[in-house]
Every structure is written in structure tokens, then in C-alpha cells.
Amino acid sequence: MLEQFGYRVLSAESGSEALRVLEDHESSVHLLLTDVVMPGMNGRDLFTQASALYPGLKVLYMSGYTEDVITHRGVVDEGIQFIQKPFAVQALGAKVREVLEGDKTEAPLNYSGL
């Protein structure tokens, strides 16, 4: 989906698989796109572990729940980068760009879609 915007994408079916993919990946990763609620490992725990592998990693959370619901239940912190499902591809592309905008790295960006 995000390849059409020029991003390189790493995909995984679960949080544990995502960590294996990240451990095996040999170049930098700039963004983790993850669902908030997943079986086995929630998005916040995945980001905590992934950011230990890639310091400076940014995260964009997605969920079918509203941002208010997930922050008020303590699933993630207020002020997070969030996109509510369902979303249009163009909206996701714009949100990813917004999250990465502060990253001035010259290297091509990687995107981990989980």
C-alpha cells in the first residue's frame, strides 16, 4: 500500500514476527506502523521492543477504536501519532509523511507495516 508513495515496506503478521523481521533487517528503519490491539503483544509493547533495536524509531498507531477510547483506557499514551481505521490509502500516505516529516535523514525511508 505505501510502496506507491516510494516507501520500502517490511510486513509481519504478528508482533513477535515483526520483531524477528526487524532483527533480521540489515538497514535502518524509520517508522513502525502497528495496530494498537493485537493478540499476543499490543502495539505499545511492540514499539518498546522495536525501538530498542532501532533507536529513534517513530511509531504510527492504527486502530478501529477511536483515539479517545484507546488513550482513556491506558492502551497508549495521549499525544501519540494515530490513524483510525478504516482509512483511505491517501490519508495513510499523508499521515506517514506527517510523522516522518521531522526526520531529515537523506537515506531512503523504510516503513514497517504491521
Image (spheres, rainbow, N blue to C red):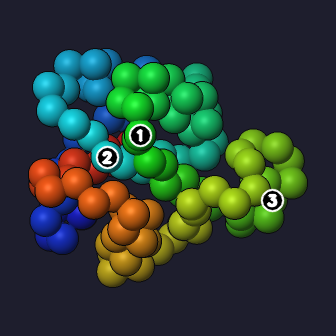
Q: Residue furthest right?
A: 72
Name the N-terminal-most of marks 1 and 3: 1
Rendering coords of residue 12 (x, y %): 32, 35
Instruction: Tell me which amino acid carries mark 1.
Output: Gly
User: Which residue bears the numbered disc 2?
Assistant: 30
Is residue 38 among the parts visible in the rendering?
no
Residue found at x 57% / y 38% = 43
Residue 114: numbered disc: none
C-alpha gap between disc 1 and disc 2: 7 Å
Q: Quick check: 66 above or below 52? A: below
Instruction: Tell me which amino acid carries mark 3.
Output: Val
Q: Quick check: 41 above or below 88? A: above
Rendering coords of residue 95 (x, y %): 43, 71
Instruction: Tell me which amino acid carries mark 2.
Output: His
User: Which residue bears the numbered disc 3?
Assistant: 69
Residue found at x 71% / y 66% = 66
Describe residue 45's horizontal placement relative to residue 111 as left or right. right
- Of circles 1 and 3, which is in front? 1
Rendering coords of residue 111 (x, y %): 27, 50
Report the number of discs: 3
C-alpha gap between disc 2 and disc 3: 27 Å
Rendering coords of residue 16 (x, y %): 43, 21
